[in-house]
Image (tube, rainbow, N blue to C red):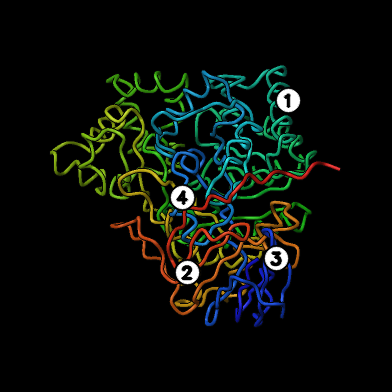
Amino acid sequence: MLQITNATVLDGTGAPAYQSDVTIDDGRITVIGTAAPTEKTIDASGLVLSPGFIDMHAHSDLQILANPDHTAKVSQGVTLEVLGQDGLSFAPIDDPTRAAVRRQIAGWNGEPDDFDFSWDSVEGYLARLDQGIACNAAYLVPQGTLRMMVVGTENRPATPAELDEMKRLLAEGLQQGALGMSSGLTYTPGMFATTDELVELCTIVAEYGGYYSPHQRSYGKNALDAYGEMIDVAQRSGCALHLTHATMNFEPNRGRGVDLLQMIDDGLAQGVDITTDTYPYLPGATTLAAILPSWTSAGGPDALLARLQDPQDRERITHELEEIGTDGCHGCVTDWNTIEIGGVKNPALSGAVGNTVAEIAAGLGKTPSWVFFDLLVRDNLATTILQHVGHEENVRAIMQHPTHTGGSDAILVGGKPHPRAWGTFPRYLAHYVRELGVLELADCVHHLTGRPARRLGLTDRGLIREGYHADLVLFDPATVKDTATFANPRQQAEGIPWVLVGGVPVIENGVRTDALPGRAIRRAPTP
């Protein structure tokens, strides 16, 4: 048994704080209030006791297994993260698809040495998580991986038989515990799905009480049309919709966050179940290959690399990037000054990390497009980037909306990953609560705990309640602070001395313990 004494409790509902002791036994909260003393106590004087934070958009699919210490996340107070994002992940999967996906998203997950891929199903992947991880993890079936397995990487509609097979695999994954489905509609091959195909798949998700989490077709020039398509999919299928990393980026969307929120409000008024998540930063992060026009990806990575080395294809790609605007760059003309190299796989390219494509080009006396092609080919498509395309007014408006939850969208690998990998949740508490007052503290905690738990359908997590799992965070509201920066992104937050997963400390007096109490969180069986 463990007792937390003298705590200022924010219970995850948004209600005002209250003072109380909290007793934990066998991984659950047993008493809120006065109870018999226990052998082990934590004096929480001056600290806020909150439910553990839920990261609604994580890219730790392999890293949480290959590097189970996972300090980047648990040191922020994250006790649950949702994996399988952006339509590309590792379950369900077959051997040819596994090889292709590993290569395509090496920039998200790295390529761990001697890694044991001894699963091919959602059930198998969740069982691997159950062997012991730092925090809990839930999973979404990735629509792009389904399409790669069944249809391949061709740009064409699925046949009726292929669609039936994707629906079968999706239903199987949901039966095995996945909480819903994700899509990556600017990534191969998920981008090749029609709206009708997505509706058909989401109908299956709805039957199992899950939710749809799409990376939509545009966050730039055509963002509102892309959001409209996702709301239409949800409305036609009856599926709950979670608009992940919901934002309005690039110059055409400056100040237009309010337009997105009006669209969400209109959808809610029509009965569509909509939630959102965001990260509290302006730059985004993805792979360098992601900004290519979609036609270049047909046929898979080898076909793409061949096109990148063909002079005529290079000329066409450059024209589309620099003069027309590609769907990969969200319909916007590429500004090479906004694209900073975040990580490379090839050590010979490490000097590029931390510089923009424009800066590298100037230093070499080459054109930006030459640098772009050179990096992609020499790094075998694994290069990651930061895109400095966000707008503060949009970030603030969206995070205040009542559908909002927190998601890091964190990539943990690379020489200079986005600081959101280490700083997302303390940044909400420090910058947007204490410094700017954009959110009230109790409301912010609700955004990061109780509200996402409700979206995930969890009935015994996300709140401080007797009988709930003891996934808890103790933080100092006066000193909590993200220290991760773009120059030094792997820096542990300050002011978060204790994090408990299932009642077991994973952060104790600010130091990572060796505990691995996390497990897979499965969808509750359909009644």
Q: Which mark is residue 112?
A: none
Q: Quadrant of residue 308?
A: top left
Residue 300 in the image, given as x and y percentages of width and height? 45, 21
- How far apart are the alpha carbons under marks 4 and 1? 34 Å
> Residue at point 42% right, 43% down?
286
Separation of residues labelled 3 and 1 (CA atoms): 39 Å
Q: Is residue 190 left or right of residue 422?
A: right
From the viewer's perspective, tell me whether residue 480 is left or right of residue 147. Answer: left
Gap in angstroms between the C-alphas marked 1 and 2: 46 Å
Report whether 338 appears left or right of 471. left
- Residue annotated with mark 4: 70
How far from the left and from the top, in percent, is residue 307? 35, 21
Query: Label 4 sits on what residue type?
Result: His
**Tag 3 and tag 1, C-beta contact below 8 Å:** no
Q: Residue at x 30, y 38 (%)?
A: 344
Numbered label tally:
4
Question: In this orientation, which residue lies closer to the viewer: 172 or 443?
Answer: 172
Disc on the earlier residue, 4 or 2: 4
Three-letter amino acid code at the position of disc 2: Pro
Give the residue at mark 1: 168
Q: Which residue is mark 2?
A: 497
Of the numbered discs 3 and 2, the one sitting upstream in the chain is: 3
Disc 3 residue type?
Ile
The image quadrant where one finds the N terminus is bottom right
- Residue at the (60%, 25%) spot, across then down: 120
Earlier in the chain: of badge 3 and badge 1, it is 3
- Note whether 478 is above or below 90 in the view shown: below
